[in-house]
Image (cartoon, rainbow, N blue to C red):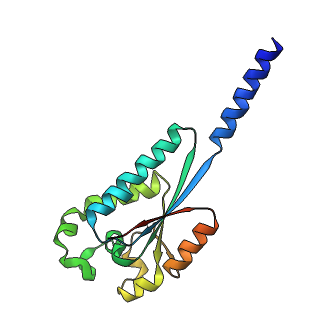
Amino acid sequence: MKKILTLIFLFLVGTAQAQEVVHKVVYDLTTSDLKLFERTILQGIVANKTHYENNLGELEVAVVIHGGAYKFFVKDLNTTKYKGDVQLTTENESLKKRIRTMSETYDVAFLMCGAGMKNNKLEKNQILDFVKVVPNASIGLIDKQNEGFAYIPVRD
């Protein structure tokens, strides 16, 4: 009986420890390709988070936005240089909702390069409210990697 109780105790301790495992990833998002963005960020992150949750773990996700990826995070394309992007204009409202779901439902942190915002003539009030501005992409990536985040580039 004592062995059975010991085994049950060890199983419960092992299960509790497995639930505490937190994996971390930072996506270095520079792509301007809408399909790649959808596949890697919108679909890929959900699939990865589901995998870890099904295995009694957790996945903490951050996305550092720079390069060609700014256009996915603006509130109104007509007030930016991206207003001529026909494909993005067609899918923009749906895309904004999906990105917001990533932030609110899946706790994805979106960090935008402030230096690149200036170069792209973007102001904070033009980007989605939940996107945090960091001084530059390098600082965002350095900080996350120093916090133990694995690095995944998403580029053209």
Looking at the image, residue 129 lies above or below residue 67: above
**Residue at horizontal 48%, vertical 48%?**
49
In terms of depth relative to the viewer, which is nearer, 98 or 60? 60
How many numbered marks have been drawn onto this rendered protein structure?
A: 0
Name which quarter of the figure residue 5 lies in: top right
Q: Is residue 147 left or right of residue 119?
A: right
Q: In what quadrant of the picture does the N terminus appear?
A: top right
Q: Position of residue 140 (x, y in %)?
A: 54, 74
Place of residue 42 in the rendered image (x, y in percent of width and height, measured from the top left): 36, 56
User: In the image, residue 60 lies at what x, y percent?
Assistant: 55, 55
- Dividing the image into 4 quarters, which one contains the C terminus? bottom left
Is 51 displayed left or right of 154 in the figure? right
Q: Residue at x 30, y 72 (%)?
A: 32
Q: Residue 95 at x, y = what percent?
A: 29, 60
Q: Residue at x 33, y 76 (%)?
A: 68
Residue at image location 49% in from the left, 78% down from the top: 137
Q: Residue furthest top?
A: 1
Q: Is residue 43 above or below residue 63?
A: above
Q: Looking at this rendering, what residue extends furthest in the right direction?
A: 2
Apparent side of residue 121 relative to residue 142 in the rendered image (left or right):
left
Classify residue 107 as left or right of residue 47.
right
Q: Is residue 120 above or below residue 38?
A: below
